[in-house]
């Protein structure tokens, strides 16, 4: 479903180009496919660590495991759920940012993009709070090892994403993109949604399961 | 030249094709006969006169694979050499002469897919049968022995109702004709316990125990070699397996038991629980968690070792007094899931034992 | 059979960029795939000398079972670095970065790869990775083999950490190359070049690129986990804190098995080009060879635990991995049979390249068969960790990937440089290599079955009970120098021919793929006009299936005087 939606958007955009700039259309096609493949490679990175977590969790005699004679507590789902809403909300705002750009509504675009950046930063602050209040340590157990490594990698991706979005904001307002040529914004949106999708899996694996 | 080049096609299958193929087939039959009917001790140790039941089984598989593999090799190499001679461009041919413009041959391709696949399936079935026999076809063992690998020796011991007997490091004795179960683990890094003549190998991994089964069927002395890189003296980590008559084995075992360390005579006053805690993390946590009894890693959890109403005695059936705990630390212990090293293997001094006892007693 | 199809020629790359100016833009920071290929070639050759020298040191150590030549500690570094450099700084860069980069875009009629700047970045990560790895000689080298299993690798913390950093770096390079090549083959083929009209080396590069793109990231994950364990004491692999040493093995081998298909698939592609050219016959079974590459690439992801059979994995896990490993033998065997059938009815010209291809057919098949021996769990429980394994993988790497690479170098050198290599030196090099290969790696099989473990700095105990062990180890040591001599000769040949080789012309071999229709060496833009393709390249009695070529080429390309002396015309003498 996601793929056909992507294709439909892609074709609609292409249709706009073929009269205007067929060379750009083909270049954009190559860059977009390449970008999607790169995100696929990133998925392999997360999948490998998720495999590690699944392996350690299913081979542990108890979960959460015992450290120093005490069983570690489960993670606090309610705070993380709130933080997840913040992150998914930023995905919604990013979607509207891109839509508004396509319809050349610059002011609305700026508003939605800034909202996305703020929500992304808020998510990172929430994660920082989560880390500081966690009962387990990175070194103490396989629980801490998997949790901090996986959510840390994710958080790093969010951090890079926030930098990326700030850059896009600056570039958009400097006139780098036009109404029909805005590949950077498309890529940024895709990246941001990718970060959201990864979080869905991590939230399930660490908080719900 | 811009004219179509001259195509030179072979007559029939090519010059001398059938004599060569027949010759290669005869060679294959000869090789198969050598593999199946002559002693292969020059390549597989003790093949002609197997030392263990599993060795005979595995060697049968080797021989079958040898016949299959050498047949493919003879045909492939033979055909390459044949083609290099038969289908070389001859002097006098035009410089642009081309060969037969054949793209495929569906019937031939069908048979060369089906026949090797069928042979491969036969090999797979045979392999699965041997695999199943060596992994699951076990009879109740008459004897259990444990191997705890260390850097750089194999600690071997024999648990029974009288307590564990510790062999000199690296020396395993086995009675011929009796099925034996060998438990393998490691106290530090990954090693690998390999007895080539038995065709027996298992990685010694810290935190897990592997279960091997075999019946030695011939007497003799055989090497144990570590075959997983484990540090600078990896190449010096070997041992010996001595397979002897049951009577000789019992005499040897009785002799070793007489050497075993007796019950604890260690002074337990002044043990430092904090030092014991550090030592525990270094030496014991590999196999024991500070958690309830049921939370086994390899050995049981040691939380409430001295005051657990569900487990009021130590694993050897004695009350959990400091002296009895110290005795287990002195001599090690063997349960049905693993083997706990004794004080020499763990490198524990008298003071260490006292500290550990103090720490363990504090886990209430 | 072929009809010129009406294809629109308004290809995206119809415009030609201006030529790069200045030494730096032309030869140092170049985005031209051909220049990048040369860079990979020379840096890869440099690391080949280093890895090979370490191998010679290993062999000198094993000349004497007491192993007094090097300290045990140094020996451990040597086999670790030999393997690490050989896998990641020699074979993979040479077959993907050098061969793939140079040949594939030319074969598909493209002006460059899809992402030329990324290609340049991929290259420069290569010497950086080498620098990181070799900096370890100043601190502590890695010691635990090219596989670096924990817990032992944790004892050599600094060395292991540097190893992780270096290999992650080259891993990123490799992943980017995989992505680049995948996109190039999918999107930049010349008009009319459908998938089933692609040359087989391009098919091979495509399958390799898919594996590279997906598997290498898993390696980075495994090494990142190891790095965190070493540097930050994160307990992924420590059983005392809930970790598992075997977890590393799963993560590592999930990449490292597909990695061996990265080594060999391009070599398969080379053989599929060299055999038709020098038999002047179509490749037999084009579709089987093309699609079996994909089958091998995909199946290759499902067999990793065959490296872990004795490690304590459940027997029920051993079973499927064993069966799928056996199954990979089928597409591989089909390729070998198709190549043999390509020889049949040909008119073979014995150039150096063809000799390497023939040597490959024999050596690689042998390596593949010993792979079957390793696939069977009961047999593997005897062979694992012994010299049998070392013999097997060197046969498929040195006798497979390296022979394929040498066939490629001797085949495409005239195209890349405009010069012919010296055939006499080339043939001598070939025979030295084959003798060296056989003498060094064949005895390893029986030494291993007899019980000689690998990664042993000294084997006195084994020599005590196996009187032939010392003899065969010495044969191996002696033979290794034959391979060294062969590589030395190749290097001399390359360097000398660059300056003084005979001028090659556009198509000395009379080959039919697109790269042979342009000048040697190709101009920076490759094709002034993008060619149109309307057939497969392997039919020697058909005219070339291309339109819109830059030059007026012979529709029936024939070997020229540059490639070897023309025979007397038919009918005379």
Image: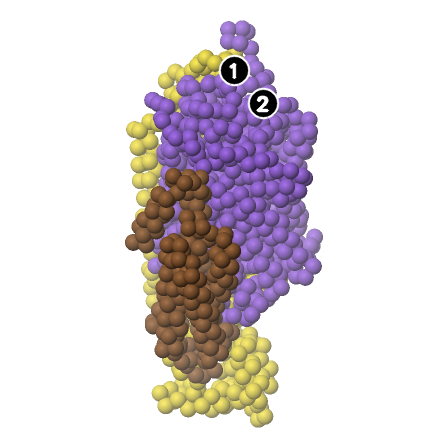
Mark 1 falls on what kind of element?
Answer: loop
Whether residue C388 is situated above or below residue B8 in the rendered picture: below
Residue at image coords 66%, 57%:
C135
Measuring from the top left, give residue C223's x and y in whole percent. Answer: 52, 60
- Label 1 and label 2 in one chain: no
Q: Which chain is yellow?
A: B
- The mark found on residue C330 in the picture is none
Whether residue C211 is situated above or below residue B15 in the rendered picture: below
Query: In the rendered view of the protein, which quadrant contains the N terminus of chain C?
Result: top left
Measuring from the top left, give residue B202's x and y in whole percent. Answer: 46, 61
Q: Which chain hosts label 1? A: B
Whether residue B49 is situated above or below residue C22 in the rendered picture: below
Q: Which chain is purple?
A: C
In the figure, residue C167 lies in which quadrant? bottom right
Residue assigned mark 2: C505
Q: Residues within 10 Å of mark 1 (few under 14, many from 20)?
A: many
Front residue of this view, candidates A46 and B26: A46
Q: Is residue B27 left or right of residue C484?
A: left
In the figure, residue A80 lies in which quadrant? bottom left
Residue assigned mark 1: B95
Task: Answer yes or no: is residue C224 visible.
Answer: yes
Q: Which chain hosts label 2? A: C
Front residue of this view, candidates B172 and C332: C332
Residue at image coords 57%, 48%:
C121
Front residue of this view, candidates C162 and A76: A76
Q: Residues within 10 Å of mark 2 (few under 14, many from 20)?
A: many
State the separation of the CA atoms marked 1 and 2: 17 Å
Chain A's colour is brown
């Amino acid at each position: 479903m996601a793929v056909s939606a992507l294709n439909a958007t892609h074709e609609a955009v292409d249709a706009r180009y073929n009269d205007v700039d067929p060379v750009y259309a083909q270049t954009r096609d190559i860059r977009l496919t390449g970008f999607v493949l790169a995100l696929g490679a990133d998925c392999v990175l997360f999948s490998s660590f998720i495999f590690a977590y699944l392996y350690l969790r299913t081979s542990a005699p108890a979960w959460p495991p015992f450290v120093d004679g005490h069983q570690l507590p489960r993670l606090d789902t309610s705070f993380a759920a709130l933080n997840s809403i913040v992150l998914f909300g930023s995905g919604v705002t990013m979607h509207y940012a891109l839509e508004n750009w396509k319809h050349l509504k610059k002011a609305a675009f700026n508003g939605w993009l800034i909202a996305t950046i703020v929500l992304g930063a808020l998510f990172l602050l929430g994660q920082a709070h989560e880390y500081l209040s966690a009962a387990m340590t990175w070194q103490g157990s396989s629980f801490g090892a998997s949790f901090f490594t996986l959510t840390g990698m994710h958080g790093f991706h969010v951090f890079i994403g926030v930098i990326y979005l700030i850059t896009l904001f600056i570039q958009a307002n400097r006139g780098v993109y036009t109404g029909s040529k805005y590949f950077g914004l498309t890529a940024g949106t895709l990246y941001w949604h990718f970060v959201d999708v990864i979080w869905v899996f991590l939230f399930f694996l660490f908080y719900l399961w | 030249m811009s004219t179509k080049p001259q195509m030179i096609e072979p007559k029939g299958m090519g010059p001398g094709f059938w004599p060569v193929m027949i010759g290669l087939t005869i060679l294959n039959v000869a090789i198969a006969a050598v593999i199946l009917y002559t002693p292969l001790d020059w390549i597989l140790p003790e093949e002609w006169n197997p030392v263990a039941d599993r060795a005979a089984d595995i060697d049968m598989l080797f021989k079958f694979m040898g016949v299959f593999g050498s047949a493919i090799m003879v045909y492939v190499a033979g055909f390459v050499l044949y083609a290099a001679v038969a289908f070389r461009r001859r002097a006098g041919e035009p410089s642009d002469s081309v060969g037969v413009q054949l793209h495929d041959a569906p019937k031939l391709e069908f048979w060369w897919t089906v026949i090797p696949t069928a042979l491969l399936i036969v090999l797979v079935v045979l392999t699965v049968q041997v695999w199943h026999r060596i992994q699951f076809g076990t009879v109740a063992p008459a004897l259990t022995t444990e191997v705890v690998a260390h850097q750089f020796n194999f600690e071997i011991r024999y648990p029974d109702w009288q307590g564990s007997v510790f062999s000199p490091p690296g020396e395993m004795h086995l009675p011929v004709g009796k099925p034996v179960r060998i438990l393998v683990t490691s106290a530090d890094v990954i090693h690998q316990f390999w007895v080539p003549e038995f065709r027996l190998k298992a990685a010694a991994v810290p935190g897990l125990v592997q279960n091997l089964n075999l019946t030695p069927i011939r007497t003799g002395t055989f090497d144990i070699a570590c075959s997983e890189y484990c540090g600078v003296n990896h190449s010096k980590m070997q041992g010996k397996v001595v397979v002897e008559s049951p009577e000789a084995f019992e005499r040897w075992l009785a002799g070793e038991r007489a050497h075993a360390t007796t019950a604890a005579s260690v002074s337990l006053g002044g043990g430092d629980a904090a030092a014991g805690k550090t030592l525990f993390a270094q030496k014991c946590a590999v196999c024991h968690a500070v958690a309830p009894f049921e939370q086994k890693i390899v050995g049981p959890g040691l939380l409430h070792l001295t005051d657990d109403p569900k487990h009021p005695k130590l694993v050897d059936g004695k009350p959990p007094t400091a002296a009895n705990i110290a005795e287990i630390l002195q001599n090690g212990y063997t349960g049905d899931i693993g083997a706990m090293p004794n004080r020499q293997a763990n490198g524990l001094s008298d003071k260490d034992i006292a500290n550990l006892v103090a720490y363990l007693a504090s886990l209430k | 059979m072929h009809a010129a199809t009406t294809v629109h020629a308004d290809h995206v790359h119809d415009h030609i960029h201006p030529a790069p100016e200045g030494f730096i833009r032309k030869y140092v920071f170049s985005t031209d795939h051909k220049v990048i290929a040369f860079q990979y070639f020379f840096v890869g050759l440099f690391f080949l000398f280093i890895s090979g020298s370490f191998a010679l040191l290993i062999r000198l150590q094993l000349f004497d079972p007491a192993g007094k030549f090097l300290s045990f500690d140094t020996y451990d570094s040597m086999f670790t670095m030999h393997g690490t450099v050989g896998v990641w700084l020699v074979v993979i860069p040479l077959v993907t970065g050098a061969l793939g980069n140079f040949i594939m875009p030319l074969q598909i009629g493209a002006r460059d790869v899809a992402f030329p700047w990324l290609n340049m970045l991929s290259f420069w990560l290569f010497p950086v990775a080498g620098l990181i790895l070799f900096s370890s000689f100043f601190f502590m080298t890695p010691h635990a083999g090219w596989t670096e299993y924990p817990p032992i690798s944790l004892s050599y913390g600094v060395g292991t950490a540097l190893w992780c950093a270096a290999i992650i770096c080259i891993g990123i390079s490799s992943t980017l190359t995989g992505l680049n090549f995948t996109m190039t083959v999918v999107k930049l083929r010349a008009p009319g070049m459908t998938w089933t009209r692609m040359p087989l080396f391009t098919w091979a590069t495509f399958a390799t690129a898919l594996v590279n793109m997906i598997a290498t990231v898993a390696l980075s994950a495994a090494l990142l986990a190891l790095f965190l364990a070493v540097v930050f004491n994160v307990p992924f692999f420590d059983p005392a804190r809930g970790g598992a040493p075997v977890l590393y093995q799963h993560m590592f081998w999930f990449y490292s098995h597909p990695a061996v298909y990265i080594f060999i698939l391009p070599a398969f592609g080379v053989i599929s080009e060299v055999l038709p050219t020098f038999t002047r016959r179509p490749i037999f079974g084009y579709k089987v060879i093309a699609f079996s590459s994909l089958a091998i690439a995909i199946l290759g992801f499902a067999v990793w635990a065959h490296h872990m059979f004795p490690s304590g994995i459940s027997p029920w896990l051993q079973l499927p991995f064993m069966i799928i490993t056996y199954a990979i033998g089928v597409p591989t065997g089909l390729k070998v049979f198709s190549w043999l059938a390509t020889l049949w009815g040909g008119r073979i010209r014995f150039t150096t390249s063809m000799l390497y291809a023939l040597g490959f057919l024999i050596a690689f098949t042998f390596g593949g068969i010993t792979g079957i021996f390793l696939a069977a769990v009961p047999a593997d429980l005897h062979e694992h960790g012994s010299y049998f394994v070392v013999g097997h993988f060197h046969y498929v790497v040195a006798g497979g990937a390296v022979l394929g690479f040498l066939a490629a170098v001797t085949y495409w050198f005239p195209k890349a440089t405009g010069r012919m290599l010296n055939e006499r030196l080339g043939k001598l090099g070939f025979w030295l290599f084959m003798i060296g290969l056989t003498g060094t790696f064949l005895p390893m099989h029986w030494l291993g079955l007899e019980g000689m473990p690998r990664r042993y700095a000294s084997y006195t105990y084994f020599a005590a009970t196996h009187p032939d062990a010392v003899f065969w180890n010495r044969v191996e040591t002696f033979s290794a120098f034959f391979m060294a001599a062969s590589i030395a000769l190749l290097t001399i040949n390359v360097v000398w021919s660059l300056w003084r080789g005979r001028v090659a012309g556009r198509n000395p071999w009379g080959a039919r793929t697109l790269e042979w229709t342009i000048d040697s060496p190709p101009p920076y833009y490759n094709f002034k006009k993008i060619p149109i393709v309307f057939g497969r390249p392997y039919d020697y009695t058909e005219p070339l299936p291309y339109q819109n070529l830059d030059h007026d080429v012979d529709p029936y390309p024939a070997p020229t005087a540059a490639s070897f002396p023309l025979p007397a015309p038919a009918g005379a003498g």
